[in-house]
């Protein structure tokens, strides 16, 4: 499965995929895509299986909060890229219950050593 975006200048670029399921595809509009009308194509084994039009506009990145009020901690993932290219992702926020459980687990392991 792949997605390509053809921008208003006629340049076709592959789009990085974030998530793919039977009913949904989340992708990033490729860097360098010109603003204006663009065509998005979904390809499976190099065959177009879906096509649509979108309007591409210049935007600023947004940051969302875990409690959706714009004041709390970020609803985000951190990505660490190691010198060898290895990648590790983790959530920047854990609900209190999960943190408490994690602390108990660490404390229990330390006590048994």
Image (spheres, rainbow, N blue to C red):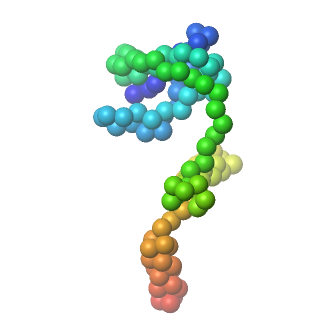
Please provide percent x and percent y for residue 45: 37, 21
Residue 97 quadrant: bottom left
Name the residue located 60 percent from the left edge and 25 percent from the top edge. Answer: 57
In this rendering, position of residue 97 left or right of residue 30: left
Please provide percent x and percent y for residue 69: 54, 56
In this rendering, position of residue 90 left or right of residue 32: left
Quadrant of the frame with the N terminus? top left
Q: Is residue 5 visible?
A: no
Query: 70 or 91: nearer the eye?
Result: 70
Q: How many marks?
A: 0
In this rendering, position of residue 106 left or right of residue 50: right
Q: Is residue 24 visible?
A: yes
Please provide percent x and percent y for residue 42: 41, 22
Furthest residue toward front? 69
Please provide percent x and percent y for residue 21: 34, 37
Furthest residue toward top? 10
Name the residue located 43 percent from the left edge and 39 percent from the top edge. Answer: 19
Query: 82 or 48: nearer the eye?
Result: 48
Residue 63, compared with residue 46, is above or below; it is below
Residue 57, compared with residue 26, is above or below; it is above
Name the residue located 50 percent from the left edge and 90 percent from the top edge. Answer: 111
Residue 70 quadrant: bottom right
Name the residue located 37 percent from the left edge and 15 percent from the top edge. Answer: 47
């Amino acid at each position: 499965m792949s997605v390509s975006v053809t921008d208003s200048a006629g340049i076709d670029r592959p789009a990085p995929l974030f998530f793919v399921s039977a009913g949904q595809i989340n992708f990033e509009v490729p860097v360098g895509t010109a603003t204006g009308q663009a065509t998005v194509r979904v390809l499976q084994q190099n065959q177009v299986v879906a096509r649509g039009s979108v309007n591409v506009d210049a935007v600023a990145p947004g940051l969302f909060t875990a409690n959706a009020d714009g004041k709390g901690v970020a609803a985000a993932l951190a990505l660490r890229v190691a010198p060898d290219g290895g990648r590790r992702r983790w959530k920047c926020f854990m609900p209190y219950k999960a943190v408490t459980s994690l602390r108990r687990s660490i404390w229990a392991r330390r006590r048994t050593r």
